[in-house]
Image: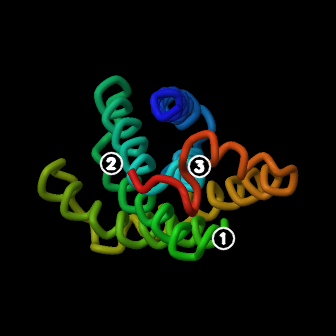
Amino acid sequence: MKSKTNLTKMITLAMLVALGVVISPILRVEGMCPMAHFINIVCSVLMGPWYSLLCATLIGIIRMIFMGIPPLALTGAVFGAFLSGVFYRVSKGKIIWAVIGEIIGTGIIGAIASYPVMTYIWGRTGLTWLFYVPSFIGGTLIGGTIAFIFLGALKKNHLLESFQRSLGGGVHGSRA
């Protein structure tokens, strides 16, 4: 049974990564990537913080390599992905806290962490420490709202708990 759960986790992770890579550039607002935040929150709720962190990292690396996206694809995603899962677990399964974790992690921490990366590594000039905060918060609010509605619909139809159980995740599932 455990190997079936692990296979299901890997397949789900691969599908979320593929979905994140494909829809991020399509459903995009200039300076924002709301669908990345949607994927982060969904992955956090379904699989937990570590899988969400891995998913965001893989999406960011693939987008940077194949699409020429700057390092914002990583700095703007990993903190929110992880905190989304942590806040969801700590709140004992409240979806709104997964969204708040994404907003704090990406909208504030990720945005501020992006400044030194873009200034000193990427060579971008004329930025301030808070330069990315408005667009990152805007993107997380859009993606978080979509994720909240989507996950709320799954929960209302009793599918969310079923998906979490099959993945060994959720609030009381595996911590891996």
**Tag 1, which secondary structure?**
loop
Type of residue at label 2?
Leu
One can see residue 175 in this view: yes
Q: Is 148 left, or right, of 31 in this rendering?
A: right
The earlier-in-sequence mark between 2 and 3 is: 3
Type of residue at label 3?
Leu
Number of residues whose C-alpha sits closer than 10 Å to that of mark 2, classed few (under 14), some (14–19) or many (20 or more): many
Question: In front: 109, or 5?
Answer: 5
Number of residues whose C-alpha sits closer than 10 Å to that of mark 3, classed few (under 14), some (14–19) or many (20 or more): many
**Residue 35 quadrant:** top right
Q: Is 146 left, or right, of 104 in this rendering?
A: right
One can see residue 25 in this view: no
Q: Is residue 53 above or below residue 61?
A: below
Q: Which residue is mark 2?
A: 74
Q: Is 127 left, or right, of 166 in this rendering?
A: left
Question: In front: 120, or 154?
Answer: 154
The earlier-in-sequence mark between 1 and 3 is: 3
Q: Is residue 68 above or below residue 94?
A: above
Q: Residue at x 32, y 55 (%)?
A: 75
| Tag 1–tag 2 contact (CB < 8 Å) | no
Q: Which residue is mark 1?
A: 94
Q: Residue at x 63, y 67 (%)?
A: 93
Mark 2 → mark 3, Cα distance in angstroms: 21 Å
Q: Which residue is mark 3?
A: 46
Q: Position of residue 101 (x, y in %)?
A: 50, 69
